[in-house]
Image (spheres, rainbow, N blue to C red):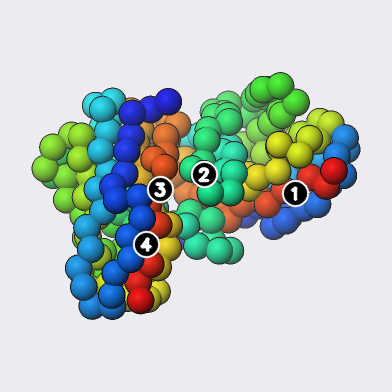
C-alpha cells in the first residue's frame, strides 16, 4: 500500500505571512505529483501537476517544488490572504497505475 | 470547467436500502473515479473505471459496486446502505493519467 503523507495536518497563519507545507511520497516508480486546493463545501480544484525532478510551478502567490529522488514536494504561499483558507491535497501518481493516491491534506486557516 | 455532474446532490436514506449515485460527463474522458470524503482521511478511492465496462476496486470498495455501460456515465451503488456510508461522495474524471477534475459532490445521509 502506497503511503502519501502531508504535514502538518492543520496550520493557522496570520494574514500577510508566508507559509509552506510538505507532501512526502515514495521515491520509486514516480510518475507525477499533483496539488489540489479544496475549499469547504466545494470540490477539489487542480493547482499543479509536476512530473520532473526539480520542477517548480507557480500560480500567483502559490508555488510548488518537486524532489522525486528524496520523495517530497513543498507548497508555498506568499503573503497569505483569507481566501487562501482551504485544505491542500497532494496526490501521487505511480508509473503504470491508473489512479492517484491522495494524502490526507493540510488544512490551512488564515487569520485576519 | 470540466463538464461533470453528479446526481442527486443530496440524499437521505434509511439503513438497509440500496442507493445509486450517478456521475455524468460530457468530456468523453476515459477515466472515471468515485471517492468519499472522510474527516482525517481526505479523499479515499472507492472504485474507478478505465473504460466502458472496465472497472476496478479502490481502497474502500466493500459495500459498494459500480457500473459503466457507456463512456459518459459511471454509477455507484450502495448495495445495502449503512450509517458508516454517510459521507460526501465525489466523482472525478481524467482524460489520461494526468489531472483529475472533480464533480460537485453528493451528500449522503444514512439514518
Q: Residue at x 40, y 74 (%)?
A: B84
For the residues labelled 4 and 3, the Cα–Cα distance comes to 10 Å
| Disc with the residue nearer the chain's start (2 vs 1) | 2
The crowd level at tag 1 (other Cα within 10 Å; few <14, some 14-19, many 20+) is many
Q: Are marks 3 and 1 on the same chain?
A: no
Mark 3 highlights which residue?
A: B105
Q: Are marks 4 and 1 on the same chain?
A: no
Mark 4 highlights which residue?
A: B108
Q: Secondary structure at mark 1?
A: strand
Q: Residue at x 75, y 26 (%)?
A: A61
Whole-percent x, y for residue A12 in the image: 80, 52
Q: Are marks 4 and 2 on the same chain?
A: no
Where A38 falls versus B97 (above or below)? below
Q: Are marks 4 and 3 on the same chain?
A: yes
Q: Badges 4 and 1: C-beta atoms under 8 Å apart?
A: no
Read off the chain for label 4: B
Whole-percent x, y for residue A88 in the image: 63, 44
Whole-percent x, y for residue B79 in the image: 20, 68
Read off the chain for label 1: A
Q: Secondary structure at mark 2?
A: loop
For the residues labelled 3 and 2, the Cα–Cα distance comes to 8 Å
For the residues labelled 4 and 1, the Cα–Cα distance comes to 27 Å
Amino acid at each position: 500500500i502506497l503511503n502519501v503523507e502531508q504535514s502538518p495536518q492543520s496550520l493557522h497563519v496570520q494574514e500577510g505571512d508566508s507559509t509552506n507545507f510538505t507532501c512526502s511520497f515514495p521515491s520509486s516508480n514516480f510518475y507525477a505529483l499533483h496539488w489540489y486546493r479544496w475549499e469547504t463545501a466545494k470540490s477539489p480544484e487542480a493547482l499543479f501537476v509536476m512530473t520532473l525532478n526539480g520542477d517548480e510551478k507557480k500560480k500567483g502567490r502559490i508555488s510548488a517544488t518537486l524532489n522525486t529522488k528524496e520523495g517530497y514536494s513543498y507548497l508555498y504561499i506568499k503573503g497569505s490572504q483569507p481566501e487562501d483558507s482551504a485544505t491542500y491535497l497532494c496526490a501521487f501518481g505511480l508509473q503504470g497505475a491508473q489512479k492517484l493516491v491522495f494524502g490526507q491534506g493540510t488544512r490551512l486557516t488564515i487569520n485576519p | 470547467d470540466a463538464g461533470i455532474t453528479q446526481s442527486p446532490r443530496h440524499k437521505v436514506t434509511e439503513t438497509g436500502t440500496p442507493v445509486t449515485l450517478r456521475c455524468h460527463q460530457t468530456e468523453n474522458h476515459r477515466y472515471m473515479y468515485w471517492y468519499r470524503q472522510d474527516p482525517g482521511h481526505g479523499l479515499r478511492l472507492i472504485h474507478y473505471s478505465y473504460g466502458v465496462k472496465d472497472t476496478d476496486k479502490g481502497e474502500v470498495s466493500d459495500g459498494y459496486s459500480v457500473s459503466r455501460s457507456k463512456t459518459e456515465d459511471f454509477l455507484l451503488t450502495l448495495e445495502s446502505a449503512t450509517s458508516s456510508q454517510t459521507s460526501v461522495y465525489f466523482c472525478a474524471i481524467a482524460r489520461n493519467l494526468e489531472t483529475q477534475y472533480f464533480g460537485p459532490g453528493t451528500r449522503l445521509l444514512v439514518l
